Structure formats: structure tokens, C-alpha cells
Image (cartoon, grey):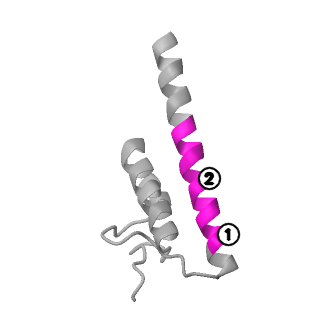
């Protein structure tokens, strides 16, 4: 199975994306677009796990933690915005 890569820097990207989140950031994309791309990247990492491979399990766990951290930051940002 072929892996999609960022057309700018070569970083692995989820199927259907052409630019990685970092290159999106550099090009001036808004944060919601970047967050969605990062979540898709992390979900793609999780789905690419092959059974019994420790390295893939580690990548999957890191991806899950990345998603959880972004969701927590988003929640804190919304709470902060409501309080101001």
C-alpha cells in the first residue's frame, strides 16, 4: 500500500491530504483546518497498525495521546472564551 506524502516536505499525510499540518501552518491555514488535518493524521496512524508490532503500537499510543491533548486544549480554550 502506497503512503501519501506532503507535496512540500515529504512528511506522511492521511489519504486525501496533500500538505502536512506544519506546511499548512507555514502557508497560513487557519487553526481549525490544521487541527482537523492533525486528527486525520493521527487516526490514519492508528488504523495502520499491524498485529504484534511493538513499534506500531507505540506510534498508535502517541497518536491517541496527541488527539486527547488537542481535544483537552480545545475544551480549555472554549471554557476560557466563555469566561471572558
Specify start and end residues of the magenta stretch as a single range: 57-72
Query: Which residue is nearer to you in this view: 47 or 15?
Result: 47
**Image quadrant containing the N terminus:** bottom left
Residue 47, image x and y in percent? 46, 70
Of helix, strand and loop, which one carries label 2?
A: helix
Residue 30 in sight: no
Picture residue at 50% right of the left edge, 73% below the top: 11
Q: Residue 79 at what x, y percent from top left?
A: 51, 20
- Look at the numbered disc 1 and give the secondary structure of its residue: helix
Mark 1, Cα crowd under 10 Å, few <14 / some 14-19 / many 20+, is few
Q: Is residue 76 magenta?
A: no
C-alpha separation, residue under disc 1 versus residue under disc 2: 11 Å
The 10 Å Cα crowd at callout 2, few under 14, some 14 to 19, many 20 or more, is few
> Which is the main secondary structure of the residues drawn in magenta?
helix
Cβ atoms at labels 1 and 2 below 8 Å apart: no
Quick check: 34 left or right of 54? left
Q: Residue at x 67, y 77 (%)?
A: 55
Q: Which residue is mark 2?
A: 65
Question: Front-most of 19 and 69?
Answer: 69
* Residue sticking out furthest to the left: 16
Left or right, 4 with reference to 50 = left
**Picture layout, residue 84 above or below residue 37:** above
In the drawing, what numbered circle is on residue 58?
A: 1
Amino acid at each position: 500500500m502506497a503512503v501519501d506524502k506532503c507535496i512540500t516536505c515529504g512528511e506522511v499525510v492521511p489519504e486525501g491530504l496533500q500538505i502536512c499540518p506544519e506546511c499548512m501552518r507555514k502557508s497560513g491555514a487557519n487553526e481549525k483546518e490544521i487541527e482537523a488535518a492533525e486528527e486525520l493524521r493521527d487516526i490514519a496512524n492508528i488504523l495502520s497498525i499491524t498485529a504484534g508490532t511493538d513499534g506500531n503500537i507505540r506510534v498508535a499510543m502517541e497518536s491517541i495521546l496527541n488527539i486527547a491533548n488537542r481535544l483537552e486544549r480545545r475544551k480549555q480554550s472554549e471554557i476560557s472564551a466563555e469566561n471572558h
